[in-house]
Amino acid sequence: FGYEEEEENSFPLVLVEGCGYVALSTALTLTLLALKVLPISQSVTCGLLLRAFWMTKGIGESFPKAGMEPSLQTRAVGFAVGPGSAIFLLKGSGAVAKRAELIVTSSLTFISAVIVLFPAFSARWLFRMDLSSEERARDRGVFRGFGQGNLINSILMTFLLCGIELYAALGYMTVVWGLQSFHGGYIANMHRELGVNRERFLYQMLTAALFALP
């Protein structure tokens, strides 16, 4: 993101750490499914628990140090993804647990989409932070990127819970990746927020197109 030196628990580094946990969440879910270790609902739950760990760690420690004050909505999401997911895992892969998980992943998809489209509003709504000024443009871009990573993860999990076959769900996910790369680079102008070349978004779109091909 163009940050050379940042204090530990700074706002952008907390978000980059969150992106790492989201990537681990996606990788764990896909690995469990590819190896057929667990059924879909429980594989998704394991992925959600990784996200919940980061959220719990953040609310208790890193969020306040980074100037992030979790709102009631954020705490509610943390509860649904954390203890809620643990309950789903213990309950197994029943229809009720699967529907409840679908509500959680659909909610995460909606919240992630709002972050991508309206990062300044989302920062106030979720963390009571003001990112609307020009001085916070780069932080706003990082937050938008955080939303993009979350959107890819949550929409993949939603597709899987809806019964879409794994490789088809991955194809649809890459289409979403390509669309949000186009939005970031050519509509939201993230390259200006982050101070990077616009071409990187074109490379992302081309890569997404290659992976989306049957």
Image: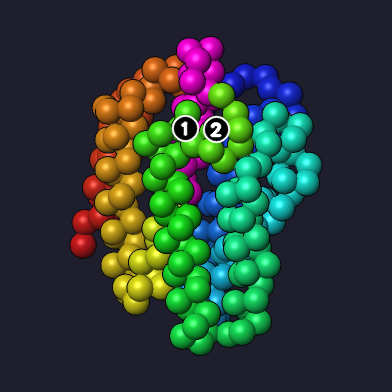
Residue beneath the point at 53% across and 51% down: 23
Q: Is 141 one of the magenta-colored residues? A: yes
**How crowded is the residue under tag 2: few (<14 C-alpha within 10 Å), some, or many (20+)?**
some
Residue beneath the point at 45% across and 39% down: 115
| Magenta residue span | 131-152
Q: Is disc 2 in contact with disc 1, using a CB cutoff of under 8 Å?
A: yes
What residue is shown with label 1? Answer: 121
Q: Position of residue 177 (x, y in %)?
A: 34, 46
Q: Is residue 64 left or right of residue 146?
A: right
Q: Main secondary structure of the magenta part?
A: helix
Q: Is residue 89 left or right of residue 205?
A: right
Residue beneath the point at 42% across and 54% down: 109
Cα separation, mark 2 vs mark 1, equals 5 Å
How was this image coloured?
rainbow
Q: Is residue 115 left or right of residue 212?
A: right
Q: Is residue 157 visible?
A: no
Residue beneath the point at 51% across and 30% down: 142
When the figure is inspected, residue 169 is found, relative to residue 131, above or below; the finding is below
Q: Position of residue 209 (x, y in %)?
A: 24, 47
Q: Quadrant of the C terminus?
A: bottom left
What residue is shown with label 2? Answer: 124
Helix, strand or loop at label 2? It is helix
When the figure is inspected, residue 27 is found, relative to residue 62, above or below; the finding is below
Helix, strand or loop at label 1? It is helix
**How crowded is the residue under tag 1: few (<14 C-alpha within 10 Å), some, or many (20+)?**
some
Amino acid under label 2?
Arg
When the figure is inspected, residue 158 is found, relative to residue 117, above or below; the finding is below
Q: Position of residue 12 (x, y in %)?
A: 61, 29
Task: Name the image quarter holding residue 62.
Answer: top right
Q: Position of residue 179 (x, y in %)?
A: 27, 43
Q: Residue furthest left?
A: 214
Closer to the camera in the image, 37 or 75: 75
